[in-house]
Image (tube, grey):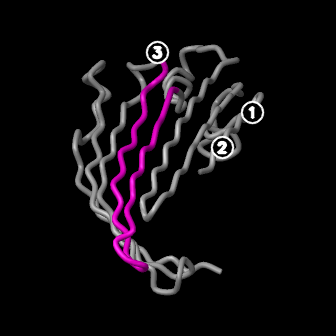
Amino acid sequence: MSVGLSYNVNDKTTRTGGQLGSTLPNPVNMRTAIADMMFKYQGWGILGEYFNRNVDGYTLNGTNNTAMLRIPQGQGFNIHVSKMLSRRSEMVVRFAGTEPKKGFEEHIYQYRTKALGYTYYLNKHRVKFQGYFGLDSRYHPQKQSLLYPYKNRVNAMVQVELGI
């Protein structure tokens, strides 16, 4: 079992992600807390993650409203359950999502992702083939003019990972 905690502060950042991301018209103060836990036992793996981001230190002046109100902030989570089927095969189920900070529901979408995945290990954990099939949902019930082009989207991913 492993547990991790982190807290990150970016004062007067001009990027939507703190140090990375789109440029903001005004500096902001960004605080991000992350907690995660991983537990493995007899071929089963459970991963849980929680994220919380708060942004402050800015004022709205009419020309920056759209950019400033859409800075990602609120809570996020990820729950991941996996089972080793053999020494080389693993199945995984994942559920993840975000919730906008209270008062920002009108400007930030609520996301949900559900996925079923498979991993085949070619050379231990150094070389692996992965794929998943998922359903992404975006909700924005507050404001019709900001509705995203889709509410539900099916997606698939295939990748080969080469490690050291």
Disc 3 target residue = 102
Q: Earlier in the sequence, mark 1 or mark 3?
A: 1
Disc 2 target residue = 4
Residue range of the region highlighted in magenta in the rendering: 74-102
- Label 3 sits on a secondary structure element that is loop
Please report the residue visible at 43 percent of the width from the left and 79 percent of the height from the top: 87
Query: Of the numbered discs in the image, which one, if any, rests on residue 10?
Result: 1
In the foreground, 96 or 16 = 96
Query: Of the numbered discs in the image, which one, if any, rests on residue 147?
Result: none
In the foreground, 108 or 14 = 108
Q: In this view, does 63 lie to the left or right of 82?
A: right
In the foreground, 32 or 16 = 32
Does the magenta segment cover residue 79?
Answer: yes
- In space, the residues marked 3 and 2 are separated at their CA atoms by 26 Å
- In space, the residues marked 1 and 3 are separated at their CA atoms by 21 Å
- Quadrant assignment, res 15: top right
Q: What residue type is labelled 3?
A: Lys
Tell me, yes or no, whether the two marked residues, 2 and 1, touch with CB atoms within 8 Å. Answer: no
Q: Percent from the top left, x then y, of residue 58?
A: 67, 18
Q: Is residue 88 left or right of residue 151?
A: right
Please report the residue visible at 70 percent of the width from the left and 38 percent of the height from the top: 6
Tell me, yes or no, whether the two marked residues, 3 and 2, touch with CB atoms within 8 Å. Answer: no
Q: Percent from the top left, x then y, of residue 16?
A: 60, 37
Other residues around mark 1 within 10 Å, as few (<14) / some (14–19) / many (≥20): some
Q: Which amino acid does label 1 sit on?
A: Asn
- Label 2 sits on a secondary structure element that is strand
Q: Which amino acid does label 2 sit on?
A: Gly
